[in-house]
Image (tube, rainbow, N blue to C red):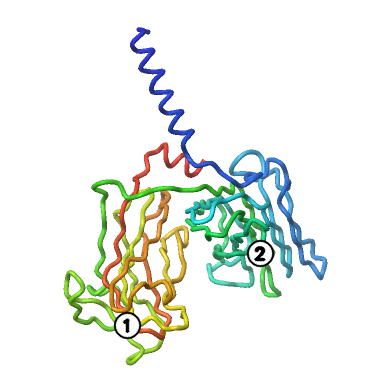
Amino acid sequence: MSRRLIVVVFTLAALAGSARAQRPANVMPNHSFEEGMSGWQPSVNDPSHVGAAVTVDRTQAKHGAQSLKIGLPAESRAAATSPPAPVRGGQDYLLSFWYRCEGFSETGNYAGVNLQYVVNWLDAEKKPVGAGGMGLSYGAVPEWRFMTRMYLSPQEAAFVALTFPMSVNDKGRPSSFWLDDVQLRAWPGEPKPGAKTWVFRVADGTYQQDLFRRVADDDTATGFAVLANPRFNDKPGYLAANLYTRAIPPGQYRALYRLKIAEIPAEPQALLAWDLNTDSVGFLNAGTIGTAAFKQAGAYQDFVVRFVLPPGVAWIDPRLTWNGGVATWIDTITVVEEKTFTQDDVDFLME
């Protein structure tokens, strides 16, 4: 091998190593349970002594040689809580993990077995300053499934702890849940110059038309918006839905919901619930928008939500649900690219 080729190979390897070194680190201790239950706290409520348990399973693993298992043979409850992990306030964090489950429901609808995860943000004294989370599948997931979701930590947050609670009621069947490779990583990112964008004009028909109205609006590019007005209807419903975007490759993105409200009440109110629904992995992200988040009444404002799209997702549907109370207009939902993933990025995301 020539000296010049050796130098080129060495330089490329050094650059690759540097890129890997700059990638965000996982802050979650004992994330793949290779140290058994070390740091993780089990909790079991088994009044009828049916054998409910939280254990380490050495026969099942997605990462390493073992995983965490919650087994509920009959009516009972159990949970596993992570050790507090250090975080910075006001930072986007990407939570990811692999899971599978047996038993549960045959139809995918609730049938007595419930599984979810809870994100508990803590301050420097480890007192609660916020919480989030999501329900997982009601149906069995026989193969390992990858889950990922972006969270913005509260400004006061210094630690975070994750809890995975599961329950079986008197109508539920014996069920088990396995968890592996739990990662929480600070996830920076901005739209790149000339980034791809996908703009969806809600007034074109992607809203619940029996509840809300398409109205003229000079503050939009098309001259139209969709209005939720309590004078005509105070029922909650989809102010935006059924967009079903199919052309977006795996990568990291941000969704912009362009909204305005008629007034900002003196007492803050819950106004809207939003989510980024998918065909295969549930919500990529979800949350709420309150009236206090608006800076000015009668003026459009973009609400920005970051998310990561893993492989294997055929479509996403950015949705918005109006809760009633304050007149609200929606113009567009725009998805902006931050980065399209290479295979190396996908491997890093899901390793």
Residue 166: mark: 2
Helix or strand or loop: what does disc 1 sit on?
Answer: loop
Q: Quadrant of the N terminus?
A: top left
Instruction: Point out the frontmost of discs 1 and 2.
Output: 1
Distance of label 1 from label 2 (alpha carbons)? 42 Å
Closer to us: 333 or 127: 127
Image: 62 above or below 262: above
Image: 225 above or below 40: below
Residue neighbourhood size for the residue with mark 1, other residues' Cα within 10 Å, grouped as few (<14), some (14–19), many (≥20): some
Location of residue 83 in the rendering, given as x and y in whole percent from the top left corner: 68, 51
Name the residue located 58 percent from the left edge and 65 percent from the top edge.
130
Disc 2 marks which amino acid? Answer: Met
Location of residue 46 in the rendering, given as x and y in whole percent from the top left corner: 79, 67
Residue 102 sits in quarter: bottom right
Closer to us: 201 or 279: 201
Horizontal arrangement in the rendering, residue 314 relative to residue 63 (left or right):
left
Location of residue 243 in the rendering, given as x and y in whole percent from the top left corner: 31, 66
Residue 273: mark: none
Location of residue 168 in the rendering, given as x and y in whole percent from the top left corner: 68, 69
Mark with earlier residue (1, 2): 2
Residue farthest to the top, as pictured: 2
